[in-house]
Amino acid sequence: MEEYGTVISDMEGPSTRRFSFVINRDRVVKRGQFVQLKVKGGQLIGRVSDIMNTNRYFSNPESVKSVEESRPMAETYPTTEWEYLVANVASMGVYNDGRFADANFPPSPGEKVFAPDLEVLRRFFGLESAGGLHIGGLDHHELEVKLSLTRLLQKHLAILAMSGAGKSFLMANVIEELLDRKEDDGKVATIVIDTHGEYTSFADDPAYSNRVKVVPIEELKIGLSGLGRHQLASLAGLSGPQARELGKVMSGMKPPYTIKELISAVDEVLESRSKEIILASLDSLKELGIFGARDTPNVTELARQGILTVIDMSGTISMKKKRLAVAHVAGRLFEARRSGGVPPFLLILEEAHQYVPEKVQKEHAICRGILQTIAREGRKFHASLCLISQRPVQLSTTILSQCNTNIILRVTNPYDLKHIGESSEGITRDVQDQISSLQVGTGLVVGEAVNFPLFVKIRHRKSKESDKGLPLEQAALNYRKEAEKRKQDAKEFM
């Protein structure tokens, strides 16, 4: 193994939590790299948290000032010979014969520090050698990061980052891995609530198009006659007595029926003072255009093994319509999964803070109940959630705490950072400080999917990227070209 340097003794260590080593002159060590060295009980794995440059000739300000006033220090003293780098290392754990333990003994001063054995590193972090989801590589090391499907998804996943940090790019990689899995490795159904139409590009990619179904929000319908009176009354914002009045009308109708037919029946049958309120509420729901006679598509069309279903929400700006769609889809999927009617599934929620917000009125949290139910109980039925959000602080604490794996990309908002630090076990202060300075394309995996927090360089995407993610300059150029083409076409037509 490549030797990096030698453990030194300083005012703070070595200790069981940290140590420092002087870096050999002919070696390059970077912040974030992993190191390995012998300790009592096995091989200690540590992560370089910082690197300092030191030189004894420049340690005393008064001496430096005095000498430099007459001539440069380098002309008087052999300064370059006394300049050296010191790496500070956070101890992570001890590996011994396939087992891992906390570091209970500090390294000895003078102990040699080495580059880690990649197989030991893979096992240390709990990465898969085959059959896992390949999301990228270990920064500074030639090791692919392949995560166990079960450990990553069964207890739910959250992808958190500021806008533009690469959340959708990372999720596209995960989807690619799910679609490309071999039959013998086990395939799940994947359903994505696509708020901005970013995942519809999978349907335009020849490599994936035959495994993708896009459902525009305009084509998604909630079967009205499949709803109970309490459900419909709740959506319409009716009181208890008004719900009973509506229930009388619904009980006399033969399913399937449309909301237009229900409105007509209410108008004909009811004579109470609640009639106008009920009619106004139902008419408001009708205007959303999401209710039909039957569920379309039905739940077995939404969840198919090895298939990606994209529910494209970009066709509406109505948050109530979006939340109704999510509540309906999530409820039907979970109900069908509990009865074995659909395969194990992953439900991906883009802009999750819009659907499961923290501390809002009931009418703005239509889908929070069912999503929290899936978050609490879904693992027992292999119904998995993935929440994607650029505002973690606005996400329901209840549901976020149920996501046992977080992949965090760059976050700079101090409130979001604090929220992440409080809700994600295993994030030390040192690791949290690095989140705000992460480069686009680098993420931190923490939680159930890995044994220890892990920084990952996200791999290149294989599938076609969405036009929705184009740079502003390119979007402006495309618009100009399209405008010129329309102008040319009109001239030729004339």
Image (cartoon, helix red, strand yellow):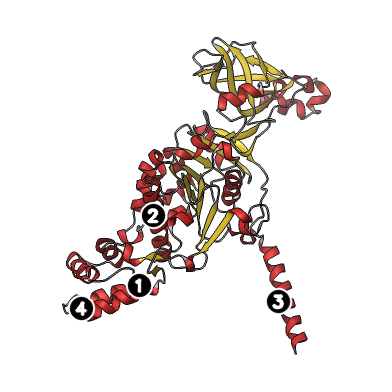
Q: Can residue 113 be seen here?
A: yes
Q: Is residue 92 placed above or below 286 in the rendered structure?
A: above
Alpha carbon separation for disc pair 3 and 1: 42 Å
Q: Secondary structure at mark 3?
A: helix
Q: Is residue 160 placed above or below 56 in the rendered structure?
A: below
Q: Are marks 4 and 2 in contact (CB under 8 Å)?
A: no
The residue lying toward the viewer, choosing from 344 and 483, is 344
Residue type for callout 1: Thr
Q: Nearer the viewer, mark 4 or mark 3?
A: 4
Q: Which residue was labeled with disc 3?
A: 483
The residue lying furthest to the right in this view is: 75
Q: Which residue was labeled with disc 1?
A: 258
Q: Which residue was labeled with disc 2?
A: 332
Q: Quadrant of the C terminus?
A: bottom right
Which residue is at a point 51% across and 68% down the rendered structure image?
A: 315
Mark 2 and mark 1 lie on one chain; the one further toward the N terminus is 1
Residue type for callout 3: Ala
Q: Which residue was labeled with disc 4?
A: 269
Q: Secondary structure at mark 1?
A: loop
Q: Residue 262: x percent and y percent?
A: 29, 74
Q: Nearer the viewer, mark 2 or mark 3?
A: 2
Q: Is residue 246 placed above or below 15 in the rendered structure?
A: below
Label 3, residues with CA under 10 Å away: few <14, some 14-19, many ≥20: few
Q: Secondary structure at mark 2?
A: helix
Mark 4 and mark 2 lie on one chain; the one further toward the N terminus is 4
